[in-house]
Amino acid sequence: MELLSDELLEDTYLAAIQYNLEDDFIRMLLIEMKRRQLNKSVVSNVV
C-alpha cells in the first residue's frame, strides 16, 4: 500500500465504490486511508 500516493489511494477508493468492487478491497483501502489520516470528506461523502 505504501507505493500508492495519497491521491491515487483516494481515487482508487472512490472508483472501487463507484464500480461496486469487493467489500474486502474497499475496506482495505479505507483502513489505509484512515491510517494515513487522509481527507475525511472523501470518506464521509461515500460511506
Image: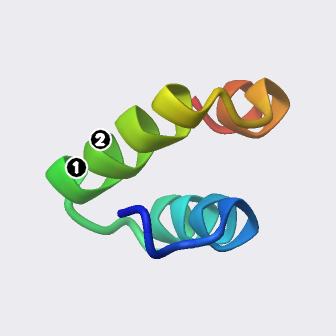
Q: Hey, what amino acid is under mark 2?
A: Arg
Point 66% across, 33% down: residue: 43
Report which residue position mark 1 lands on.
23
Circles 1 and 2 in contact, beta carbons < 8 Å:
yes
Q: Nearer the viewer, residue 20 or 14?
A: 14
- Disc 2 is placed on an element classified as helix
Q: Hey, what amino acid is under mark 1?
A: Asp
Placement of the C terminus among the 4 image quadrants: top right
Mark in the foreground, 1 or 2: 2
Report which residue position mark 2 lands on.
27
- Disc 1 is placed on an element classified as helix
Give the side of residue 1 with respect to residue 47, left or right.
Answer: left
Give the side of residue 2 with respect to residue 13, left or right.
Answer: left
Other-residue count near label 1 (Cα within 10 Å), few / some / many at <14 / 14–19 / ≥20: few
Point 38% across, 65% down: residue: 20
Vertical order, 43 against 26 (above or below): above
Point 16% across, 49% down: residue: 24
Q: Give coordinates of residue 38: x percent, y percent.
A: 71, 36
Q: Give coordinates of residue 16: x percent, y percent.
A: 45, 67
The scheme the figure's colours follow is rainbow
Q: Give coordinates of residue 45: x percent, y percent.
A: 76, 33
Quarter-of-image position of residue 21: bottom left
Placement of the N terminus among the 4 image quadrants: bottom left
Give the side of residue 8 with respect to residue 34, left or right.
Answer: right
Point 52% across, 73% down: residue: 4
Q: Give coordinates of residue 18: x percent, y percent.
A: 56, 67
